[in-house]
Image (tube, rainbow, N blue to C red):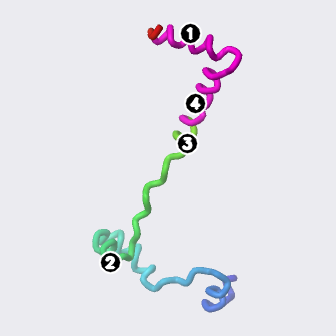
Amino acid sequence: MSGLDSDAKVAMGAKAARPEAKLAKPLAQRWGDAARQLGLVVEQPPKKRTAPRVAIGILIGAGGAYLLDPERGAERRHRLSKLLGAG
């Protein structure tokens, strides 16, 4: 694909290089506020941390399954309430 001219690259779906893209990085490094105001640099939103959310979801689900088990769940809930001092 490197031997194709820019029109062929655009026709194939490749992104056309913006002329201001060459200026954006040096401007952002030197004059970050000015580059952002001109719209040359778009700040990326912070990445969401999904691993802690998944871990908490797994713990909540496992705890629910443990306490709501039809065979021994009532006994476990009773022991837990005794342990927490509620009963």
Q: Amino acid at mark 4?
A: Leu
Observer-nearest of 19 and 70: 70
Q: Residue 59 has which mark?
A: 4
Compared with 56, 65 (above or below) is: above
- Using a 10 Å C-alpha cutoff, classify the residue at mark 4 as few (fewer than 14 neighbours), some (14 to 19) or many (20 or more): few
Q: Residue 38 has which mark?
A: 2
Badge 4 or badge 2: first in the primary sequence: 2
- Could you tell me residue 85's position as x and y percent? 44, 9
- Cα separation between marks 1 and 2: 64 Å
- Quarter of the figure with residue 5: bottom right
Q: Magenta residues?
A: 56-84
Q: Main secondary structure of the magenta part?
A: helix
Q: Residue 79 has which mark?
A: 1
Badge 1 or badge 3: first in the primary sequence: 3
- Using a 10 Å C-alpha cutoff, classify the residue at mark 2 as few (fewer than 14 neighbours), some (14 to 19) or many (20 or more): few
- The residue beneath circle 3 is 51
Badge 3 or badge 2: first in the primary sequence: 2
Compared with 20, 53 (above or below) is: above
Compared with 80, 48 (above or below) is: below
Badge 4 or badge 3: first in the primary sequence: 3
Q: Residue at x 60, y 31 (%)?
A: 61
Image depth: mark 1 or mark 2 in front: 1
